[in-house]
Image (spheres, rainbow, N blue to C red):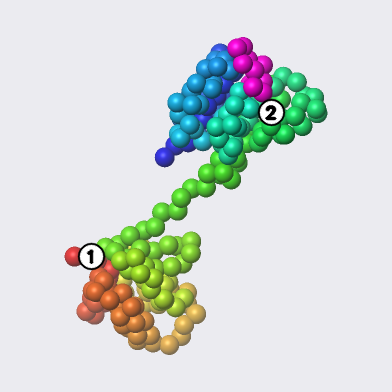
Amino acid sequence: MEASILVADDELRMRKLVKDFLKQKNYHIIEAEDGEQALHKFGENQNKINLVILDVMMPKLDGWSVLRQIRQMDKNVPIIMLTARAEEQDELFGFELGVDEYITKPFSPKILVARVEAILKRTNPVKKELKSYGGIKIDNDARTVTVDGKNVELSFREYELLKYLVDNENIALSRDKILNTVWNYDYYGDSRTIDSHIKKIRHKLGKKGKYIQTIRGIGYKFEMK
């Protein structure tokens, strides 16, 4: 899902500049032209907004006031402040109030986008997707396998073999190809070691072991029927 960013700045030209560059990265932009509107839109979309970009000098409510009130509603949403002043005291003041980044105008839009991406990556890590194959779930990051929610203990080579089979679902794989890929050319015995590993994997997968089919005269194929 694309991240939503609230951009609050009373200058239409500045909002458009920021919006155009962020939209190139497929971010959803919510705009506000003054401090009161920024607070209203944040309140309406609080559960959707992943990051806030606030200009300091805005009518009705300045950026500092908006920052304080947003922090009362949400202590964690990342906030980038934009300002025309480069005073050290202002920056320190902003950090004390909970600013994550402080960017002085004029700035490079590409630098702003890079900082936005870095903050979102840090604060909203992408949820890893677990690949599921008929009840068999493989977490490639943790190198774990579960069957119907129950953890299955596989050796390093068993895991690699199962992963190779499911990554090539519905494709008949020869024993030589499996040996060369999974064992990475470092095994010099015969291909019967594959049969032994397949037998163990099938046993550990229980009823799901039937998905690993023997292709007579060729090798094996992972296929769900």
Amino acid type indicated by mark 1: Met
Residue on which disc 1 sits: 224
Residue on which disc 2 sits: 103
Q: Earlier in the sequence, mark 1 or mark 2?
A: 2
Report the side of 165 relative to 27 (left or right). Answer: left
Foreground pick, 151 / 35: 35
Horizontal and vertical percent for residue 169?
Answer: 29, 63
Instruction: Tell me the quarter of the image containing the N terminus.
Output: top left
Which image quarter: residue 81? top right
Count residues near mark 1 (Cα–Cα under 10 Å), then give few for <14, some for 14-19, many for 20+: some
Q: Give the range drawn in magenta.
A: 54-65
The residue most toward the left is 225
Foreground pick, 163 / 2: 2
Horizontal and vertical percent for residue 213?
Answer: 24, 74
Q: Residue at x 45, y 34 (%)?
A: 48
Please say whether residue 45 is visible from this viewpoint. yes
Measure the alpha-carbon separation of dots 1 and 2: 54 Å
User: Dot 1: what SS?
Assistant: loop
Q: Residue at x 69, y 32 (%)?
A: 97
| 55 inside magenta stretch | yes
